[in-house]
């Protein structure tokens, strides 16, 4: 589980652990450690060397994972003319290159074993163009494309894939924007919760092996 130090990533890790899984939480802000049915590893998913270290550790200690959840991401709202090249590069590195590196590292071993489940956390921004979202949308549209190609390549291998694309979720990522005080944004009380996304992930990965939940789209209820 990447990006598992807070928000959706932490909620998904907690949900899967409560369901009986041994969870491995990856994030660049975490330190290596272990607890009951939980392992934490420091890992910046934009760095191939750190991803490789995490994979070696996980496979040596626990074996090939049954479920891999790509969640790590960064988010900001900037118009095109306000978005610097560094901002754009950071968004693509974390939101798109990171999921690629994680999938490339874990999926081949799943295929060799003949079972596994790759879950990708997308966004409504992977299909809807919101103003101020040039960098984020570019990365999330890319994630959707990456997911769909991986799904096509894995057909018939026994490895399942699911894209979970939520709309606005009340997490710390909204703190710099303060949507409650900024015109044009959904108020936080009307957003979904990280636990809602976690429940969707649990639903997808606990279906019978004859069922693949290819995609789950989520949106806050209109009021």
Image: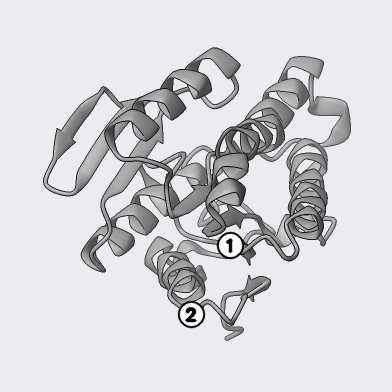
The local secondary structure at tag 1 comes to loop
Q: Is residue 26 above or below residue 123?
A: above
For image coordinates 17% across by 34% down, the residue present is 34
Which image quadrant for residue 98?
top right
Residue situated in front as seen by the camera: 161 or 139: 161
Residue situated in front as seen by the camera: 134 or 2: 2
User: Farthest bottom residue?
Assistant: 223
CA gap, disc 1 and disc 2 = 26 Å
- Give neighbour class at mark 2: few <14, some 14-19, many 20+ (Cα, 10 Å): few
- The answer to whether residue 116 is left or right of residue 43 is right
Q: Position of residue 209 (x, y in %)?
A: 52, 76
User: Farthest right residue?
Assistant: 81
Which image quadrant for residue 42?
top left
- Name the residue tied to disc 2: 207
- The answer to whether residue 9 is left or right of residue 74 is left
In which quadrant is the C terminus drawn? bottom right
The local secondary structure at tag 2 comes to loop
Q: Is residue 74 visible?
A: yes
Q: Position of residue 72 (x, y in %)?
A: 53, 39
For image coordinates 53% across by 59% down, the residue present is 115
Q: Is residue 178 visible?
A: no
Q: Position of residue 75 (x, y in %)?
A: 61, 39
For image coordinates 78% across by 36% down, the residue present is 135
For image coordinates 50% across by 72% down, the residue present is 190
- The answer to whether residue 31 is left or right of residue 65 is left
Q: Is residue 106 above or below residue 183?
A: above
- Name the residue tied to disc 1: 168
Q: Nearer the viewer, mark 1 or mark 2?
A: 2
In which quadrant is the N terminus drawn? top left
């Amino acid at each position: 589980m990447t990006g598992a130090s807070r928000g959706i990533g932490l909620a998904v890790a907690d949900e899967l652990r409560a369901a009986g899984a041994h969870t491995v939480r990856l994030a660049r802000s975490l330190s290596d450690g272990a607890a009951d049915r939980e392992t934490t590893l420091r890992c910046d998913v934009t760095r191939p060397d750190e991803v490789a270290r995490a994979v070696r550790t996980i496979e040596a200690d626990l074996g090939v994972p049954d479920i891999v959840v790509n969640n790590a991401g960064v988010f900001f709202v900037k118009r095109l003319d306000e978005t610097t090249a560094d901002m754009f590069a950071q968004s693509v590195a974390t939101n798109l290159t990171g999921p690629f590196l994680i999938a490339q590292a874990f999926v081949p071993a799943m295929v060799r074993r003949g079972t596994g489940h790759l879950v990708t956390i997308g966004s409504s921004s992977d299909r809807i163009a919101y103003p101020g979202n040039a960098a984020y949308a570019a990365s999330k549209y890319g994630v959707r494309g990456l997911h769909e190609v991986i799904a096509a390549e894995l057909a018939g291998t026994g490895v399942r894939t699911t894209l979970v694309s939520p709309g606005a979720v009340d997490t710390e990522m909204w703190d710099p924007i303060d949507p409650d005080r900024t015109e044009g944004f959904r108020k936080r009380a009307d957003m979904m919760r990280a636990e809602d996304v976690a429940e969707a992930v649990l639903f997808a990965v606990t279906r019978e092996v004859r069922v693949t939940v290819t995609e789950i789209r989520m949106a806050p209820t209109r009021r």
